[in-house]
Image: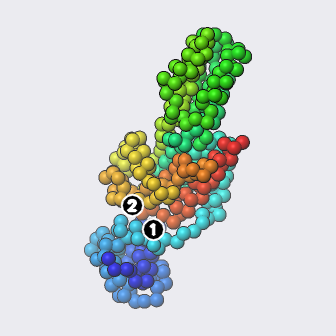
Amino acid sequence: MPELSERKKQILANVVEMYIKSGEPVGSKGLISSSGMNCSSATVRNEMNELDQMGYLVQPHTSAGRIPSEKGYRYYVDNLMPRRDVDEFTKRMIDAGIAPAAGDPEKLVNRARELLADITKCAAVSTAPVGELNIIRKIELVPVGMHTAMMVLLTSNGILKSRLCRIESDFNVTILEQFYNIVESFFIGKPSGEISPAEIQTIAASVESNYFVMLPLLAAVSDLSGSTNDSKLILGGGANLLSRKDYGDKAIPLLEFLNKKEPLSEVIRSSKDDLSIRIGSENLFKQLEDSSVVVSKYSVKGDNSGSISVIGPTRMDYESVISSMRYLSDLLGRLITSALEE
């Protein structure tokens, strides 16, 4: 495929940006009026016709102007889209919106998803850290009654899990000391996915006379640590898609697809780069052929940990969405790292 001339690049960029703003096909006269290009309408019309033949533009109706094709969007995103920092208004909105969640990693991830849906007017997805990066950082046992206590487990990447535990004996100082000694010796600093039921039985047996007291507590540790490895993928802002005219009657089937956890999880997991943009048929599933999926990973203590994503029509304001996501994912990673170091 021959390289585009500078004039064709300028025309393609203008068509994409005008169509994103208006949702209406772009004609040669409107393009010249909007962009101030110093050439005739006939010249622009010929260039647009060639871009159509090359597959970058599409004419939806014979008498209409042009709109970007999937190929046109891809070329624009990869080669023509300006890379800019988030604007000050959006930056202030993000800073103010996420501040109340500072200090709580789970709330930070949830708030980031909510903000992203509000800013982009698309669906937003957040994932919490999973896999081998989930090192057990802290386990607390807080008595709330004579025989019951709340167990709280925190991983190095900010996943917080809790559950009530019950034992037949009273929670006394001896039991708590023995529990914390076991926690320090066997669990702190260990990947949460490596705690097996067989190991729990072995550890409980080592305490001999307190076997039946420790076993339910250690089983609770195993349950909580295992649950941290379930991908905590949450969809928000789905209702935004109902108001996007690009989807029409396809919005509800799309929402039904997005609410199925496993295929959506596969869409997010398949994105390997720090920032990835899949447009239309580049997505794994036919249900996303009219959508773009933008995934931005956030890092905690230098490791890729989770992600925030936007799902919306291919007529997406890529420049605005991407600048907001870059800023938000960077801020999210820094705030979670700070919360875990406190």
The residue shown at (50%, 41%) is 131
Residue 324 occupies quadrant? bottom right
Instruction: Report if the CB atoms under discs 1 and 2 are less than 8 Å apart.
Output: yes
In the image, residue 242 sits, relative to residue 154, either above or below, namely below
Say which label, 1 or 2, has the lower sequence index.
1
Left or right side of 199 for 58 = left
Q: Residue 21 at x, y = what percent?
A: 47, 67
Q: At label 2, which amino acid type do we have?
A: Ile
Left or right side of 166 for 63 = left
What is the count of numbered marks? 2
Q: At label 1, which amino acid type do we have?
A: Val
In the image, residue 110 sits, relative to residue 326, either above or below, namely above
Q: Residue 295 at x, y = what percent?
A: 48, 54
In the image, residue 252 sits, relative to residue 202, either above or below, namely below
Residue 209 occupies quadrant? top right
Secondary structure type for disc 2: strand
Q: Residue 285 at x, y = what percent?
A: 33, 51
Which residue bears the numbered disc 2? 279
The residue shown at (34%, 56%) is 289
The residue shown at (72%, 42%) is 342
Categorize mark 1 by other alpha carbons within 10 Å: few (<14), some (14-19), many (20+). some
Circle on res. 85: none
**The N terminus lies in quadrant:** bottom left
Depth order, front residue of 173/75:
173
Left or right side of 4 for 134 = right
Which residue bears the numbered disc 1? 77
Depth order, front residue of 173/239:
173
Categorize mark 2 by other alpha carbons within 10 Å: few (<14), some (14-19), many (20+). many
